[in-house]
Image (tube, rainbow, N blue to C red):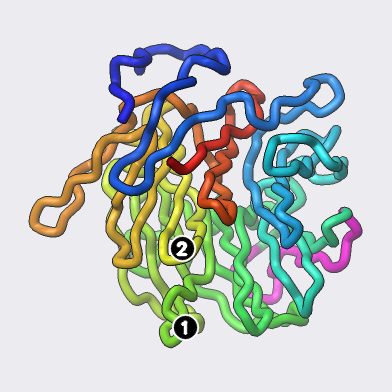
Amino acid sequence: MATAGLFSLGSTTALSHDYFKDAIIGHGSHRYKIDMAWGELNRKQFPVKDCHEMVQDAKGRIILLTNHTQNNVLIYDKSGKLLDAWGKEYPGAHGLTLHDENGEEFLYIADNDRHEVIKTTLEGKVVQIFPYPKETGKYENKEAYIPTETAIASNGDLYVSDGYGSQYIIHYDSQGNLKNIFGGQGDEPHLFHNAHGICIDDRDPKNVVVLITARQQNKLKRFTLEGDYIDSIDLPGAYICRPVIHNKHIYLATIWSGDGSEGTGFISILDENNTLVSAPGGSTPKYENETLRPMHQTLRVFRHPHDVCVDEDENLYVAQWNSWGTYPIKLYRV
């Protein structure tokens, strides 16, 4: 594993592409070689602002969502070659979820500025818009609703996390009809401070649950599909974005760490028992009496990781928020 002496944690400038050329980061069986130059493009033609989220489609393409309206969506192959670009109408593009619906794939874009979720084809054609949920009676106006992420269950039900707004989770059926609303802001276990990310955890087919991050609380909370609180996974010192399920593991971009200072991000990887087993760019996970010791950044490979995409070879693609307009970083599993 690379050592902390490779780079001063006090630095605030971007690194050259070859700075971590021979470094291996991570812990245990989840260790990675770093490619800082993956996805680098002509900044005048294909600029990015915040690289918020990434998904992989059935063709193996890596789809990046950015809030730069010259091109909100960039589509790469796994080598980092640009294949397509589209989108000029999503100034608050933040959440990106891909869902296969009877053999056809769709994207769900959560837009902070538009205060709505937009369903599109992979080519960018708008299929459906989910406006602010006035019918819940929880919102006086659309400005109070700032969706950050979506998750889609196997039956097509849609869950939207209002992570930058009023902290509710809005549950629709596959046709867009409201079924439920739960959560909200507060300190009780079933409430949130920054319900930033959400996903369906189907690792146990007999016990499918909803995973929701409470980022400011350093917790990953588990709920039933009906919105009943189950329990929380404590990740002290880790300000986690959305959970990403791949095989039996959970991957989480950790945007800040320690006391939440700027530029302190790393990646968190949990096993099938929801135990933190690797933290590329972060301190070695250690448990004492089944309690995780507080985590912190040890190598400034990342500034503000905002999402992780995992391909079939278990390589990672890391999108970053507020990181000098840099393109995603690729981590090769070793």
Asked whether the viewer can see residue 117, the reply is no
What residue sits 53% from the left and 62% below the top? 198
Residue located 70% across and 76% down the image: 135
Residue at 65 percent of width and 84 percent of height? 155
Of labels 2 and 1, the one closer to you: 1
Q: Secondary structure at mark 1?
A: loop
Three-letter residue code for mark 2: Ile
Q: Is residue 152 above or below residue 77?
A: below
Q: List the residue tagged with mark 2.
A: 212
Q: Position of residue 4 (x, y in %)?
A: 29, 21
Residue 154: x and y, percent? 62, 80
Q: Secondary structure at mark 2?
A: strand
- Residue 194 image position (x, y, % from top left): 47, 52
For label 2, count other residues whose C-alpha is less than 10 Å away and answer few (under 14), some (14-19) or many (20+). many
The C terminus - image quarter: top left
For the residue pair 263 and 288, the one nearer the viewer reads as: 288
Where 298 sits versus 19, above or below?
below
- Numbered badge on residue 205: 1
Find out whether residue 136 is within the magenta segment: yes
Report x, y in % for residue 326. Answer: 64, 25
Within-10-Å neighbours for mark 1: few <14, some 14–19, many 20+: few
Q: Is residue 38 above or below residue 105?
A: above
Question: What is the quadrant of the N terminus in the image?
Answer: top left
Instruction: Please check the rendered image and state whether residue 240 is part of the magenta-colored stretch, yes or no.
Output: no
Q: CA distance from mark 2 to mark 1?
A: 18 Å
Q: Is 204 left, or right, of 105 in this rendering? A: left
Read off the magenta span: 124-139
